[in-house]
Structures are given as C-alpha cells and as structure tokens.
Amino acid sequence: MERKSNIFWGAVLIVVGFLFLGTNLDWFELNWSFRKIAEFWPIMLILAGVAAFLNHKKSIYNATSALLIAFAIPLGIFTCVDDGVRDFKDDLSDGINIDIDDFDDDDDDDSSNSDTITNDRNKQYFAVEMTPDIKEATLNLKGGAAEFDLEESKNRLFEATTFLQFKGGYTLEEEKKDGGKVIDFGMKDGKGKNFHFNFDEDNNMDNDVLLKLSTAPVWTIDMGIGAGEVDFDLSNYKVKKLNIETGAASIDIKLGDKQDNTAVDINSGVASVKIKVPESVGCEIKMDGALNAKDFDDFEKVGNGVWQTKGFNTATKKITLNVDSGLSSLKVDRY
C-alpha cells in the first residue's frame, strides 16, 4: 500500500511540475491565475482524504494530509474573501447608498490659496494661473468617494470643479518650489462632515471632480484615492512621474509618448487598475504582491515578477511600472 501511495503522489508532483515548467518557459500557454487555481481548493481536502486511506495507519494524522489541509485552508479563505469583494463591486454597480452623519455639521473655512468663484455645499471651483516660467509642475491629489475625470486646460495651469453630495469639499494650496509649481488638492479633514456615497440612475457616482491641467509643463502626479473611480487620459501630457496609491477603487489611466522616460508606481489594495501605453514606447512591468489577477497583452516574462515589451532595452522612450498590490486586478494594454 505504501508503494502505491508513493507512485500516486510521485505522478501528481511530476504532472504539476511539468505544467508550471512549461508555462514559465513558454512551451505552452495556460490561461490560469491564482484566483482560478484557488477555486479548486476543495480538491486538496479530497486528496487529503485519499492520502489518509493510502496511509498504512489509515489515519488523517500524516504528513501528506496535514500539508494538503494547510494549503487548502488559506486558499478557501481567499476564495471566500474574493467572492465577497466581487459581490461588493456588483452592489456598487447596482447602486448603493452609504450615509455617515457626524454630530458636528459646521463648515470649515476655506483657507486655501485658490481662485474660488463659487463655494457652496454642492459646487466648488479652483484655479492656479499659468506663467511662462513654469517648466515643471507637481500635482498632489488626495480624495475619494467620487468620480475623477481629466480634461486639458487652455489658459491655466490647473483647474478643478467639484460637484459633491457631502459637506466640506476640497481645498487647494500652491507654492513655488525648485523653479516649478507644487499644487496640493485634496479633501478637507472628515470631521463634522456628512458623507454620501451615492450613484445616479445610470450607475455613475453623484460626486464628480473634474480636473483640468495644462499640457505645457512636465508633470509629476501623486494620487491618493480611496473608494472611487479615476479616468485620466494623460496621452497629451509630459508625465515624468506618476504615483498611484489606492484602496477599493477603479483606476483607468492612458499614458502617452511625450516624455522620454515615465516612471509609474502603483500601490493598491482591493482595486481594479487598467493602464494603456502606446506601442511606440517600450514598457516594463515589475510586480510584487500576492493574490492578484494579471492581464499583460503583448508582454514577455523576462524574470521573476518582470515583464517587458519586445525591444524594451533598446527603446528610445520607456515607461516603467512598479506595482505592489494585493487582491487587485491589473491590466496593461498597448494602443
């Protein structure tokens, strides 16, 4: 019986090892992800039972069964969490309302250096003027519970119009630094605010933040987005550095070829991140983290956690993506 057990488990190891080796060496392509593999966690419990029968003591207290159960438990937990996250996203798309009301309803004074045209509970406008001496600019964007969109500004360095369902809104601060301009645009401190996370009849967020940026300077953009949606077309901008830190958000970014080198850092939790890069630019992805879904079309895996487009090392223009995420979905397309 012990000999049959050794033959059985030896065959299992050979098959599994061959599948992983063939995938890593591109002998063949298997459309699998950790999420898909995790769905088969009950098989490990079945195999643990088989191992108990094949054990000469007919006991579940053996090394093989214990190892299989040890793998099955975290995979089962991951599957349950993943199902819960997907159900939550489905609820968002169907339209949910989350209301958190604090006791203090007093509005804070707007102490920013913004050019505020209107400032009431629902709408705010901010602007930073463009001057010929501004060659580089930095935007620090902090916010959430809203849909963020981007357009080009014809006359100003920065503009923002917010339509919000909660009190407090956003603040703007600007300063000159190292010959450039630094813009801090973010939500006010949440104390004493009514927070509403609503969707309209078209399943779009009621809270909207429309940003407008000048295409003239070289940009560094630092985004800290909580729950929300971001749809930025940066293809006409000279983006030197893009930092994205997000939780349960949907991020859709389109990059361009206006800059020789663009560095993108992504740190995400339970998020959906889609990045579009032009075919005229070499692109490299370095990804660290577990329990992620990946979709990298037209990329070759060149190392552990590293993917590149063909000819990346000799490309005159490059985009590098450094990703640190967990329980996220990352898709990178070329256009």
Image (cartoon, rainbow, N blue to C red):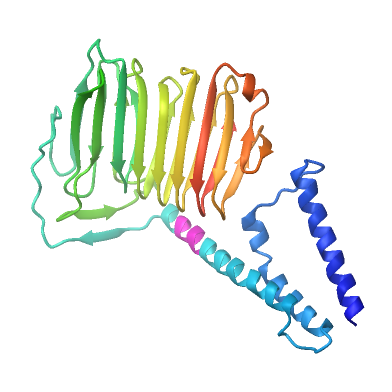
- Say above or below: 92 vs 324: below
- Say above or below: 101 vs 4: above
Camera sees residue 30: yes
| Tally of numbered discs | 0
Residue 85 is one of the magenta-drawn residues? yes
| Dominant secondary structure, magenta | helix
- Say above or below: 259 vs 195: above
Q: Residue at x 45, y 60 (%)?
A: 88
Q: Which residues are magenta?
A: 84-90
On the rendered structure, is 118 left or right of 18? left
Q: Which one is nearer the viewer's eye here, 209 or 37?
A: 37
Q: Position of residue 284 (x, y in %)?
A: 58, 31
On the rendered structure, is 12 left or right of 210? right
Q: Residue at x 23, y 54 (%)?
A: 195
Q: Residue at x 79, y 79 (%)?
A: 50
On the rendered structure, is 214 left or right of 62? left
Instruction: Give the quadrant of residue 118.
Output: top left
Q: Position of residue 27 (x, y in %)?
A: 82, 42
Instruction: Give the quadrant of residue 191.
Output: bottom left
On the rendered structure, is 131 left or right of 240? left
Q: Which one is nearer the viewer's eye here, 167 or 288?
A: 288
Instruction: Give the quadrant of residue 3.
Output: bottom right
Q: Position of residue 130 (x, y in %)?
A: 23, 16
Q: Position of residue 210 (x, y in %)?
A: 30, 33
Image quarter where the N terminus lies is bottom right
Image quarter where the C terminus lies is top right
Camera sees residue 335: no
Residue 108 is one of the magenta-drawn residues? no
Q: Which one is nearer the viewer's eye here, 8 or 186?
A: 8
Q: Residue at x 56, y 54 (%)?
A: 290
Q: Residue furthest top?
A: 132
